Image (cartoon, rainbow, N blue to C red):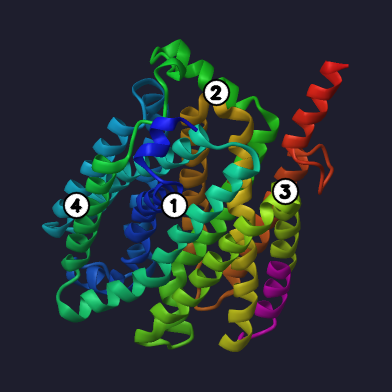
Amino acid sequence: MSSHFTRVLSRPEFIALMAALMALNALAIDVMLPALPYMGEALGIASENERQFVVTAYMLGFGLAQIAFGPLSDRFGRRAPLLIGIVVYILAAIAAVFSPSFGVLLLCRFIQGLGAAGTRVIATSMVRDLYSGRAMAEVMSLTFMVFMAIPIIAPGIGQVLLLTGPWQYIFIFMAGLATIFGLWGFIRLPETLALGNRRPLTFAGVIEGFRLVVTNRVAFSYGLAGMFLFAALFGFISSAQQIYVDIYQLGVYFPLAFAGIAALMAVSSFLNSRIVSRFGMRRISHFSVLIYTATAALLVALSMSGFMPLWLFFPLLAIIMFMFGWSASNMNSLSMEPLGAVAGTASSVFGSIQTVGGAVIGSFIGQQFNGTVVPVAFGYFSMGALALICVLVAENGRLFGVGIEYAHTDMSQHAAH
């Protein structure tokens, strides 16, 4: 780590700022959930499943723009593209306040997602610029933990804002918070990509960067595994309001149920940051994806046998989401680990694949909502099984293998002999 960076920003503040920037994405999704019925009613959308598109439109913009932010940040550095993205996010949130129709609102959400893409790509790239191996996994976990604090409180914030005024207040709140985080980054965040490490922004250079990413079997397989896990999560988030309010009749207590699951994911990420240096990214992510898939299989079996009461649904969902916390942050680190030379491009490719793929598959899962938890249960199980297949491809059929850090150590020792 450069001495310049150490002087400007402490490690805790760096982690907090990266988490805050990434949290703008979670906020843009989860703070909306209690407002979906009001937005649909105000803009003439009667179908509950159609209202989910408020979330989907944002995710598509968020996913597609990541492809551009990666090469841009590898060429021009991290700061400028990040700050431009935050400004776009703020302007789109303000424009959404004045949406005259559902179509215009969806367009504003899409543009808001375009801006937010910079925070996801560049925060991940900055972590990779400054850390590698298990240290990177530890920082990623801590970032993810703070990032997960937003879904704990976001639906509750949305509910409070709805009590004080119309649904437009939610967009004003988002714009305000993004302005605060943007100013924090502008004042405190240094450039983490050295001039000597910048890549040319030529067509050939960009294509070469993408080629390095998609042809790395280990990195790309873990990236795809992350996409499947994210798709299941998005399928649940899309229909969470319907599950908790329509099926389980929680009403205004829906944000508390949502917060409980998000809190477990935050605890999961914190525990991961404490144990990853001892057990390694591979062992933890392999163990967690196995438990995740097995629990989801049980959820499918029980949900198909009749009405599943909340006291049974909630603990099984809690186990799945706890394991998601262990799987997702480690798989993200494993996908980035071999690609330090093209961290921006790698972050953008994986972010785009995970977001667009996750949003499309997750939206399909959400649209299957039929008044039961069966579609969500199937979503978790099928996505967990596909993630497990990706892990097996990455590891040549072996689970719980040695970490890449040890592989590098072994190779250097062989080279010395």
Residue depicted at x 39% and y 31%: 4
Q: CA distance from mark 2 to mark 3?
A: 22 Å
Residue depth check, mark 3 versus mark 1: number of the one nearer the observer: 1
Q: CA distance from mark 3 to mark 1?
A: 22 Å
Q: CA distance from mark 4 to mark 3?
A: 47 Å
Report which residue position mark 1 lands on.
12
Q: Quadrant of residue 132?
A: top right
Report which residue position mark 4 lands on.
104
Q: Which residues are magenta?
A: 295-308
Residue depth check, mark 1 versus mark 2: number of the one nearer the observer: 1
Q: Are marks 2 and 3 in contact (CB under 8 Å)?
A: no
Residue 125 image position (x, y, % from top left): 46, 35
Q: Quadrant of residue 396?
A: top right
The label shown at residue 341 is 2
Q: CA distance from mark 2 to mark 4?
A: 40 Å
Residue 114 image position (x, y, % from top left): 31, 41
Residue 23 image position (x, y, % from top left): 38, 55
The label shown at residue 280 is 3
Looking at the rendered structure, the number of numbered marks drawn on it comes to 4
Residue depth check, mark 4 versus mark 3: number of the one nearer the observer: 3
Q: Tag 2, which secondary structure?
A: helix
